Image (cartoon, helix red, strand yellow):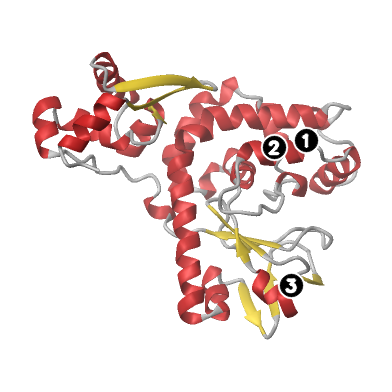
Amino acid sequence: MVVRYQLVGQDLGGVRFAISPLNELVLSLHAWRDPGRYPLHLPWIRQMQRVRGSLDDAVLDALVNDDLWTPDFLTPRPWSPLTRLEDELAAIRRTGNGVVDRDLRLLHGPGELPAPLRGPDVLDRILDALTGYWERCFAPHWSRMRALLEGDVTFRGREIAQHGLAAMFAGLAGRVRLSGDTVEVFVRSQVHYTRPATGGLTLVPSMWTSSASAPILPDEPPMIIYRARGLGTLWEPQPLPAPGALAGLLGAHRAGLLIQLATPASSTELAVRLGVTATAVNQHLRALRAAGLLVSARHGRSVLYRRSDLADQLLARSSVS
């Protein structure tokens, strides 16, 4: 079936890109239900399986049906490439009970809802489950994921500037095209509607879709979620730079870690990024912190490390940015 968004007048200039941490979190539950469909994410899926027992498995599993659909109220339209998860969760917490019940019943069909999705406090339990899932499975990797999504947005913006809107839409996915003043999205589900893109059309890159999708209901804000570029490289180990003078003083691995820690990261995130074990990374991090080159702070369930002022001075003197 097909969803059509009509771009009229100012709507043509209202095509925007946005990134949604919450969309990515919720759509990743597809891999929770059917890991075999996401072979490019196997390194992440293996880690997720190791911590699954510590999460609210029943609620998370109930948020995906057999067709790998998720409730629309949990994938709202984001407004910016800089969207924060905290702001999205706060907005979801204000969702009316009627909307929550409607979307859950659309997800699971007629009859009684699954037991984990029943009761007056269901929205609080859903948000608590998603928060725990984020902290254990997403937060250690989000900077890497966001970099890939931001790279896609930059590429699409360049496409518009160089080749125009029609070429950009044609490059999103085989199921999206601009025909005259109408954007057509060919979807797999039994969804068929045409509506004006009032307020603008938002394009959201995702790591968890094979092509492109749009909201099930026509009264939802105009949005297309499409497959981001570069997924094949997302989990490849990154090279660890070894700056000359500093590597001679600290060793190549520890000098390289200092460069990586220009922005805070956990040992788990660093291990996945570099393709090594968390144990190996922790040994180096402890040595660097003992030498006064790192500081650490707890963030949720993770400990984040970043360079100290002393480390910044050493790097500056080594001419390493």
Q: Quadrant of the N terminus?
A: bottom right
Q: Which mark is residue 5?
A: 3
Residue displayed at 55% across by 76% down: 170
Give the quarter of the image for residue 200: bottom right
The amino acid marked with disc number 3 is Tyr
Q: Which mark is residue 93?
A: 1
Front residue of this view, candidates 94 and 194: 94
x%, y% of residue 231?
Answer: 44, 54
Q: Mark 1 or mark 3: which comes first in sequence? A: 3
Residue displayed at 41% across by 39% down: 43
Front residue of this view, candidates 22 and 188: 22
Label 1 CA crowd tier, 10 Å (few <14, some 14–19, many 20+)? few
x%, y% of residue 258?
Answer: 26, 31
The local secondary structure at tag 1 comes to loop
Front residue of this view, candidates 272 and 52: 272
Q: Are marks 1 and 2 in contact (CB under 8 Å)?
A: yes
Outermost bottom residue: 180
Give the quarter of the image for residue 181: bottom right
Q: Quadrant of the C terminus?
A: top left
Distance (Cα) linking label 2 and label 3: 27 Å
Residue, disc 2: 89
The amino acid marked with disc number 1 is Arg
x%, y% of residue 168?
Answer: 53, 74
